Image: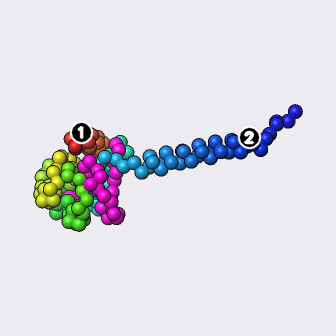
Amino acid sequence: MGYDFHTDDAQADNGTFCKYILEQGIERIRGEQQMADIAIIYQSVHHGNTKKVVEKIQEALDVDLYPVTQIETTDFSKYKGIGFASGIYMSKMHPSLFDFLKKENKLPRQAFILYTSGSGGKNYAKKYVETLKKKGIETVGVFECRGYDTYGPLKWIGGIAKNHPDEKDLKRAIEFIEDMKEKLC
Ligand SMILES: Cc1cc2nc3c(=O)[nH]c(=O)nc-3n(C[C@H](O)[C@H](O)[C@H](O)COP(=O)(O)O)c2cc1C
């Protein structure tokens, strides 16, 4: 006894299958295009310390990450808030982040700052907070941690903040973003 196969059955099955594939595809595209409520723009040129922090945040939480050098046209004003992350170079955030602020106008009204520095503990975000303020953007929070630093003569002594950012720093950074998600409105 053979299986009684009808062309009509095959067509009906095919139709259902195609519909299913189409629906799955649409769902997938929708999912991929859904944006997070927070964007983080970053620059990390020395040892990738800042990149390590923001990538860890992205692993744990729903955030959209943008390397500042790879941004084309994006309307950031759709985000609830925007974060700026950078190493500290000569006591300031990286110049590319200042340039970004100069040319970009489609921004949310609230921001936060995250930075890594060799020394730690200083108010290195001050200038950037001021620049944001001039653009009418409020800084809701600042996170900082130390980052491995071999700049200039420091390399002769093997650098400072050797194991940073460490696990504790990364955990704190994630908690900071969780807090930002609550504070941004
Ligand atoms: C050119 C240069 C200048 C730096 N200036 C400072 C500074 O003024 N204060 C400080 O604490 N660290 C300073 N550092 C150390 C970096 O801020 C630190 O290593 C940071 O974690 C680098 O981040 P990144 O690896 O994401 O670029 C400097 C590093 C470089 C390469």
Secondary-structure class at tag 2 = helix
What amino acid is found at the position of numbered circle 1 in the picture?
Answer: Glu
Q: On the image, which quarter does residue 124 sit in?
A: bottom left
Q: Pointer 1 and pointer 2: residues touching (CB < 8 Å)?
A: no
Cα gap from disc 1 to disc 2, whole angstroms? 54 Å
Residue 184: horizontal and vertical position, in percent? 22, 44
The reply, left or right, for residue 38 in relation to residue 132 is right
Secondary-structure class at tag 1 = helix
- The residue carrying mark 2 has its beta carbon less than 8 Å from ligand 1: no
Q: Residue furthest front?
A: 8
- Mark 1 or mark 2: whose residue is earlier in sequence: 2
- Ligand 1 position by quadrant: bottom left
Q: Give the number of marks.
A: 2
Residue 11: horizontal and vertical position, in percent? 71, 45
What amino acid is found at the position of numbered circle 2 in the picture?
Answer: Asp
Give the magenta part as a residue range.
61-88
Residue sitting at 23 percent across and 66 percent down?
103
Q: Vertically, is 53 above or below 131?
A: above
> What residue sits right under mark 2 in the picture?
9
The reply, left or right, for residue 146 in relation to residue 23 is left
Quarter holding the C terminus? Answer: top left
Disc marking residue 182: 1
Residue sitting at 34 percent across and 53 percent down?
65
Looking at the picture, the colour scheme in use is: rainbow
Mark 1 burial class by Cα count in 10 Å: few <14, some 14-19, many 20+: few
